[in-house]
Image: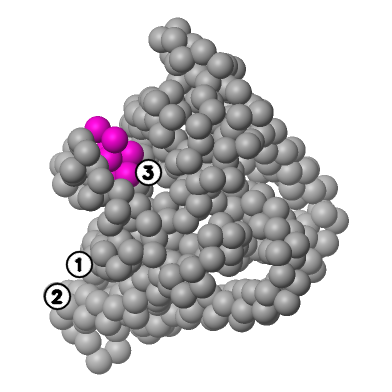
Amino acid sequence: MLTVLTRAFRVPELRGKLLFTLGLIGLFRLGQLMPAPGVDVVAVRECVGSAKGGLFDMVQMLSGGAMLQLSVFALGVMPYITASIIMQLFAVVVPRLTLLRKEGQRGQAKITQYTRYLTVGLAVLNAGTVVALARAGQLLPGCARPLLRDDGLLSVIVIVLTMVAGAGVVMWLGELITDRGIGNGMSILMFTQVVAVFPAYLSRIFMLSPGGFVVMTVSGLFLVAAVVFVEQAQRRIPVQYAKRMVGRRMYGGSSTYIPLKVNQAGIVPVIFSTSLLYLPTLAAPLLGDEAGGWVSRNLTSGTHPLYMTVYVLLIVGFAYFYVSITFNPEEVADNMRRYGGFVPGIRPGRPTAQYLAFVLSRLTAPGAVYLGMLALLPLVAFAILRDPGTQQNFPFGGTSILIMVGVGLDTVKQIEAQLQQRNYEGFLR
């Protein structure tokens, strides 16, 4: 990776893109550290350490520590990512969106516009819920101090509008990195959120137990190596293209392959499952004493067996569902047959689609189990350790490692592709 970055900085155009991306990342982190107007910063800093375990650690990690601190960019990239996932799901159900997806660049621009509108709507809902919990004193359990200087209606509206505007700015920053930077704008911002909380976690672990710090660091390195191995693993389906005559020229006769990754769904099932499990936690204060108490006891703590079971089942089920809507074997088989391609030993058309669906289902099974095990790893560690201080400072969760490794690998591939493109251009000139 260092070699790729060194080569990229030697190219003036890529160096400009990298510096532009780093500048936007710095602006993004500044917005995450800047408190929203009307928030008692001293009370938030004193009480933020009381929220630990279960979903609060996950929310703190995915937001880079911004949501529980009620900053300007408290919502981070989660509204946009959730809106993108919902639009991908609707593209299978709503015929209008299905047609737009097939129209190419024009249709994709329309879907992007709808995603932005949905992002703003989700940001209003998320910001309103977070501010309402902070106003009621239920955002950070165990905190007796008021987090807002003024809990009046006008002050609440100002804070909500500030967070919604911050979510819109984050969405704009991600699109700027995608268009003018090195690409993968939202993924890079999510990577920044996860990496931002690591130094504080590691320093706390070292202060609590130097021996535990060494053991956790070595375990984290092995976990990173295992995640890289699985993320790079793929099944290559060979494809042969027959020769065909078009006019006076002969086309085809080449061989290629269809790469099917073991983890075809990526990090999306974990993020979506976390969002779904966070909804009962937010709704618990509104359900009354009996129902709200049951939700708080069973679906809030990450060490509860019911929570672990529901979490893993949601991840596995959504992994299958997401793969089924993002990879269509029939469409791939039709495109292959249209251009004279076939899988050796498999007849074109429906038999090829059935074969691709069979291979994909067999690959999705270990991929879904792998995602479930990664997400369950920190929860099991919390249940075994039973140490609140260690639980709060556990940084090597499967989700965080998966985000860092996945985004890191994709970013390096993007930079390498741009380097190769410029090498080819220089050769042609």
Tell whether position 281 is magenta: yes
Q: Which residue is mark 2?
A: 350
Q: Main secondary structure of the magenta part?
A: helix
Q: Look at 74% across and 59% down and name the residue there.
A: 203
**Label 2, label 1: how far apart the Cα atoms are:** 7 Å
Tell whether position 381 is magenta: no
Q: Which residue type does callout 3 highlight?
A: Thr
Name the spot of residue 100 as percent of width and height, x first. Answer: 27, 40
Above or below, 333 relative to 199: below
Is tag 2's residue or tag 1's residue first in the polypeptide sequence? Answer: 1
Circles 2 and 1, Cβ within 8 Å, touching? The answer is: yes
Q: Which residue is mark 1?
A: 330
For discs 1 and 3, the disc positioned in front in the rendered view:
3
Name the spot of residue 150 as percent of width and height, x first. Answer: 51, 13
Name the spot of residue 245 as percent of width and height, x first. Answer: 34, 73
Closer to the camera, 243 or 1?
1
**Label 1, label 3: how far apart the Cα atoms are:** 27 Å
